[in-house]
Image: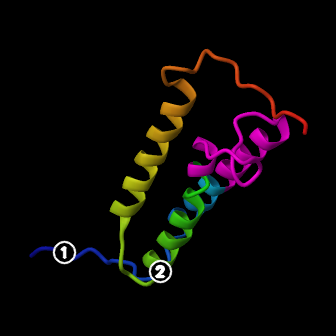
Amino acid sequence: MRKERAVSRGPNRILYGLIFLAMFLSLGHHIDHIIRGNNVGWPLTAEVTAFTYSLGIYPLILLGVYLYTSGRVGPGYWAILTVSGALFVAAIHVGPNWPIQPQPLKED
C-alpha cells in the first residue's frame, strides 16, 4: 500500500522567510548604491539605468506573494524569479564592464 504524503495547504513559513530575506537584502543593496551615490538612475536621476530596471523586483515579489497565497503559482515561480534576478545581478556586477569604477552622482 502506498502512503500519501500530507500536503500542507497553509502558508509555508520557510518560503516566506526566504522571500523576505531576499527582499531585505535587495533593499539593502539598493540603499547601499543610493548612499554611495553611484550606479543609480531614475527615480533619483534623469537617466534610466540598470538600477531603474532592478527596482522591478519588488512588484514581482509582491505579485508572487499574492499569487502564491491564492494558490495560483508554486515553487516554479520563485525558482524562475530567483535565477533571473541572480543572472541580472551577475551580469551587471561582473559583466563585461565590471572593472570600470562607477562614477559618483554629480552634484547639480
Disc 2 crowd rating (10 Å Cα; few below 14, some 14-19, many 20+) is some
SS at mark 1?
A: loop
Percent coordinates x, y for residue 75 in the rendering: 37, 63
Q: Earlier in the sequence, mark 2 or mark 1?
A: 1
Q: Residue 30: which numbered mark, if any?
A: none
Name the residue at the right extreme: 108
Q: Residue at x 47, y 70 (%)?
A: 64
Please report the residue visible at 49 percent of the width from the left and 25 percent of the height from the top: 95
Which amino acid does the dot numbered 1 rest on? Lys
Q: Residue at x 61, y 55 (%)?
A: 55
Check disc 1 and report the residue beneath it: 3
**Does 9 sit left or right of 66 as displayed?**
left
Q: Residues within 10 Å of mark 1 (few under 14, many from 20)?
A: few
Is the Cβ of the residue at disc 2 closer than 8 Å to that at disc 1? no
Q: Where is residue 69 in the image (x, y as percent from the top left)?
A: 47, 80
- Whether the magenta-drawn stretch holds residue 69 is answered as no
Measuring from the top left, give residue 16's x and y in whole percent.
Answer: 56, 66
> Looking at this view, is 99 or 103 the one in front?
103
Q: Which residue is found at the position 48% from the left and 32% from the top?
A: 91
**Residue 49 highlighted magenta (yes or no):** yes
Direction left: furthest residue: 1
The N terminus - image quarter: bottom left
* Colour pattern of the rendering: rainbow
In which quarter of the view is residue 50 placed?
top right
- As measured in the structure, the alpha-carbon distance from the residue carrying label 2 to the one carrying label 1 is 27 Å
Q: What residue type is labelled 2?
A: Thr
Reading the image, the residue beneath label 2 is 69
Front one among 2 and 69: 69
What stretch of residues is rendered in magenta?
A: 24-53
Residue mark closest to the camera, 2 vs 1: 2
